[in-house]
Image: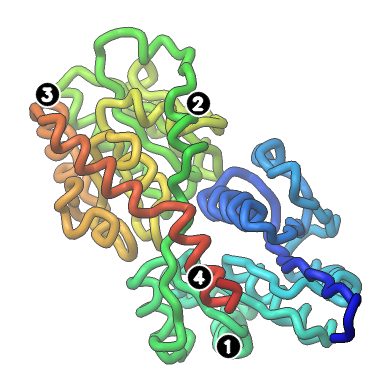
Amino acid sequence: MGAGVERKLVKKRAAIFLHALHGGGVERSFLRLVRAFLDRGIEMDLVLTRAEGPLLSEVEKRARVVDLRRTGALASVPSLAGYLRKERPEAILTGLDHNNMAAVVAKWLAGVPTRTLISAHLPLKYTAYKAPQGAKDRLFPILDRLIYRHADVVVAVSRGIREDLARYAGLDPEAIRVIYNPVVDEDLLASAAVDVNDPWFMDPTPVVLGTGRLEREKGFDTLIKAFALARGDVKARLMILGEGRERGALERLIGRLGLESDVRLPGFVRFPAAYMKRAALFVLPSRYEALPNVLIEALAVGTRVVSTDCEFGPSEVLDGGRYGRLVPVDDPVSLAHAIVEELARKESWDEVERRMRRGREFSVERAAQQYLEVLGWA
């Protein structure tokens, strides 16, 4: 370089591609990653199939939101390819099956050197490889095998998901990097201190809390049945935060069991950690998971937990039961016994602190550093 010629510092630029921001754990994880990358001086684009959902208000202001205005991830492929061709970010990160497919195909269509980092947040065993219902269901397993092999970086959010990917997508386990979700940061811990203006948290009756999308795989029907059994032995209330397609079925179940005065479904809340902090017990009744963020959040704010020992994630988070109670999947009786025993059990402050330390191991800082490493930016 000749004398007097300044070298221009070129900033890294990355894009994160998601369908929308409807409030799931995957969306929250990526929003935390956006903030962490921005804090490290990386320019960030948040590319959305459709810019909608309650989490839009939580997007970091320093990030640029790109609205593709499409109905689904696969329908957005031409628009996403156009974005990549025009903007040429150094990397595009995404998660969930359809988003992963769209990102890899869009990069190929765009003909750009952008690196694709795709991440598995759901087990193929229970999603793409479930019993096929139609032609589309039979096609996706074939596409998965092609798509995952053509990504530049493949990330699994737990060791169990890495094994699932290796088996069902035909990948070498050594080629899959395990990076736990970016869950705990100062914002999450601060949100736990936000006031919860709810009368249930203003009297001594303990509240059992569940949080997640109201979908069959989350097992909230099992939790409601277990609570109906448990309340014969303990006075408590059950609150389930979240929205989803199972709301109607869950409300009917609550009515059939006569639980209307003791079970509530308040819907989406902005600061679920504040409810976790005030709950007597957090319960994860899922039929399957990948890495349950809400379980980690509950640990991080010190709340005792009970979880099904489902594939994949809860046992990994709870270290085989060291940091919380594990019960069989789809077993209301066992879950009811665990709820009753945990509500009755006295615990020391040391136990609370151990849970908090465990939850905080799943930090945004650690995950962001690992993502930078696999991209070769650290």
Q: Is 378 left, or right, of 251 in this rendering?
A: right
Indicate the position of residue 180 as horizontal and vertical percent values.
Answer: 42, 62
Quadrant of the drawing holding the N terminus: bottom right
Residue carrying label 2: 266
Tell me whether circle 4 and circle 2 mark residues in contact (CB < 8 Å): no
Mark carried by residue 142: 1
Mark 2 Cα within 10 Å, few/some/many (few <14, many 20+)?
few
Vertical side of 326 occupied by 122: above or below: below
Q: Is 353 left, or right, of 214 in this rendering?
A: left
Give the amino acid at mark 4. Ala
Query: Does label 1 or label 3 sit earlier along the sequence?
Result: 1
Residue carrying label 4: 120
Q: Residue at x 27, y 49 (%)?
A: 358
Query: Does label 4 or label 1 sit earlier along the sequence?
Result: 4
Query: Does label 2 or label 3 sit earlier along the sequence?
Result: 3
Distance in Å between CA atoms under marks 2 and 1? 40 Å
Query: Does label 4 or label 2 sit earlier along the sequence?
Result: 4
